[in-house]
Amino acid sequence: AGGMIRFFGAWDLVGRGTKNTGAFIWKIEHRHAYTDVAPGGFGFELGYVGLIEPPFSDQGLRLTNLYWRHRFADGKITLLGGFVDPTDYLDVYALASPWTGFLNFAFSTGTTTIALPNEGFGIAAGAMLTDNLFLIGGLADLNADPTDPGQTIDSFFSDHEYFKHVEIGWTPSQDRIYLDNLHLTLWHADEREEVAQPSGWGANLSWTTYLAGKWLPFVRAGWADDGGSLTQKSVSVGFGYQPEPGKNLLGIGFNWGQPNEDTWVPGLDDQYTAELFYRWQISKAIAVTPDLQYIKNPALDPDSDSIWVFGFRLRGVL
């Protein structure tokens, strides 16, 4: 079991009430375990190459976000810089958030094929090139440690070991970008000398659409060459079903993943993951989510054919 206390918000300092705004975005968290193994590392304890609930760790106090965001050109261009979390804007779709959507990382950013950095110092930009085409790019510190912000700043400007990404996509309109989009993401991770991690790169393709105001099917796939990612090939398919916007949500997903042989060892079995969750929105501020995950062929435990994992998420907003 694990818990988390989060304090977050935005200070709008420029252009309130308009689409051209400037604001400080901040988030401070305390992540803690109630048992010997926090949910963030529980998958590896079971022999699974993956994360059954990535955010819940035992890191303690951490700085997740502290950056300046500026929007201009009538809201069509966004620039940001500071302490960033690349998963906030990289390979995004509506069910990726571990706070409100799927718990397993196989159904989140990169489908486990992107060598994501920790939250730390970085810069990013996004723009609507036309009414339908969008472009996103960024640079982040690969050696970031959100529990030591000073180290992260020093690492960004002295080590020069970066995670870089660019994404191009299509959406029916800017206001539907999280629900309806097709995008291609390319990324590159520099070599990390201190931990002897080779450089690597990869590509991810994602499609999702919003049907009849209730259904959200998705198909997401990724491929990686080195870089330290969990898997080198991965495909996730599934859907979300929400009869009323903002109310209860049902999610079902299936994933096939091939462990990255450069991160682990050659010859590991392919893994198959399924997840079923139901988010019950008790009130506007409180939601509970029972969750069931099935893992076939956990790659790091050849003696186990399958694993069942039951989870329960409680989320409250003050």
Image: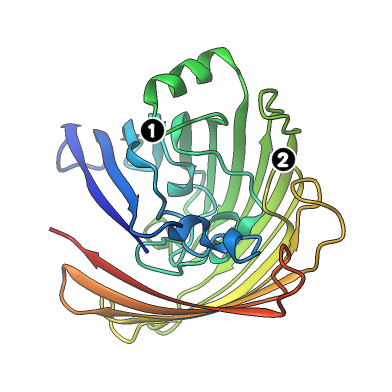
Q: Nearer the viewer, mark 1 or mark 2?
A: 1
Q: Mark 1 points at which residue?
A: 147
Quadrant housing residue 116: top right
Residue located 66% across and 60% down the image: 49
Residue 55 spot, x, y in % from top left: 42, 54
Give the x, y percent position of residue 126.
47, 40
Q: What element carries label 2?
A: loop
Label 1, residues with CA under 10 Å away: few <14, some 14-19, many ≥20:
some
Q: Which mark is residue 196?
A: none
Q: Which of 69 and 127 is in front in this view?
A: 69
Give the camera-side residue of 61 and 121.
61
Please state, as top left, top right, bottom left or bottom right, where the C terminus lies in the image. bottom left
Q: From this viewpoint, is residue 20 visible?
A: no
Q: Residue at x 43, y 57 (%)?
A: 36
Question: Is residue 125 or residue 250 the one in the foreground?
Answer: 250
Q: Which amino acid does label 2 sit on?
A: Gly
Q: Would you place residue 224 above or below residue 65 in this image? A: below
Give x and y (percent) for residue 312.
36, 74
| Direction top: furthest residue | 158
Name which of mark 1 and mark 2 comes first in the sequence.
Answer: 1
Q: Name the residue under label 2.
A: 227
Q: In this view, which residue lies farthest toward the left?
A: 318
Where residue 125 appears, x then y in whole percent? Answer: 47, 35
Label 1, secondary structure: give it: loop
In the rendered view, would you say 9 is above or below 242? Answer: above
Label 1–label 2 contact, CB within 8 A: no
Q: Which residue is drawn at 81% across and 62% down?
A: 268
